[in-house]
Image: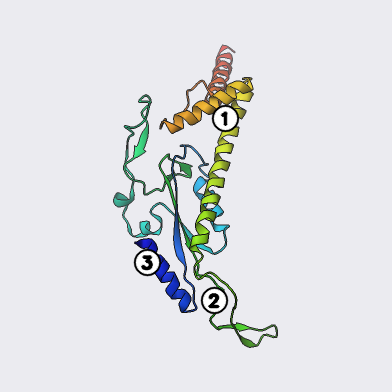
Amino acid sequence: VAAREMRALVEAVRKDRDSIGGVAEVLATGVPRGLGEPVFDKLKADLAKALFSLPAVMGVEVGSGFSCATMRGSEHNDGFVRDETAAIDVPPVLTTRTNRHGGMLGGISSGLPIVLRAAVKPTSSIPRAQASIDRDGHEASVTVTGRHDPCLLPRFVPMAEAMVAITLADHVLRRTGREDHALVQHHQPVGDAEQRRQDMFDQDRRGATVAQPAQDGHDRLDFRRRQAGHRLVEQAELR
């Protein structure tokens, strides 16, 4: 029904020698937890940048978007609950009852569907006479001829989906690189890094928590630093 109404509206606008804009919603499901950064290179910011890089985009919303401006905190907050669908139970896997945050919290993916909306402006090239200025600065009238889309939205959807997919893939590669780098620093064979990466994504697909065992990755490095710090303190006390 909605598609028929949209086609009818676009056809009416075309017959009126005009154009119309619209809003495209992109939904990304199955995104692993933990993609993005808390300050620079936030996943939310990178996705917005990717969509804004497309022609004719005038605005981008995430999750509840601009509707949150008229909501109260008690209405907008997504309450945390235990994820009963997770394959593991220790440590408990958390999720939220609602998804007003649009799948990203603090710039990092939460594991829930990422919801984005982009506002696309009306086509600027229309067969109506429009006021303009000629090369000498005098007032003039411009009428665009030829074939021009009365609505850009149908062509925009696959472009938006592609940009969102590319951005998510980039963040997956970033996290993979960090995980592999941590393993190489601890003199583990490349094969172990590959297995670690596969285990990580398997856990995300099963709904596992992002937290990793303390003996792996940067946590192990922090543990060694703490050990070294304790030894320095003991040496100072002996002196």
Residue 83, given in percent of the width and then of the height, sits at: 34, 34
Residue 121 is tagged as none
Report which residue position mark 3 lands on. Answer: 5
Report which residue position mark 2 lands on. Answer: 126
Report which residue position mark 1 lands on. Answer: 179
Which residue lies at the image location 56% right of the left edge and 35% below the top edge? 175
**Mark 2–mark 1 distance (CA, rounded to whole Å):** 52 Å
**Mark 1–mark 3 distance (CA, rounded to whole Å):** 49 Å
The answer to which quarter of the image holds residue 207 is top left
First of labels 2, 1 by sequence position: 2
Pointer 1 local density, CA inside 10 Å: few below 14, some 14–19, many at least 20: some
The answer to which quarter of the image holds residue 208 is top left
**Mark 2–mark 3 distance (CA, rounded to whole Å):** 22 Å
User: What type is the residue that disc 1 sits on?
Assistant: Glu
Viewer-nearest residue: 232 or 207: 207
Pointer 2 local density, CA inside 10 Å: few below 14, some 14–19, many at least 20: many
Which residue lies at the image location 63% right of the left edge and 24% below the top edge? 184
User: What type is the residue that disc 3 sits on?
Assistant: Glu
217 to the left or right of 116:
right
The answer to which quarter of the image holds residue 105 is top left
Residue 214, given in percent of the width and then of the height, sits at: 48, 22
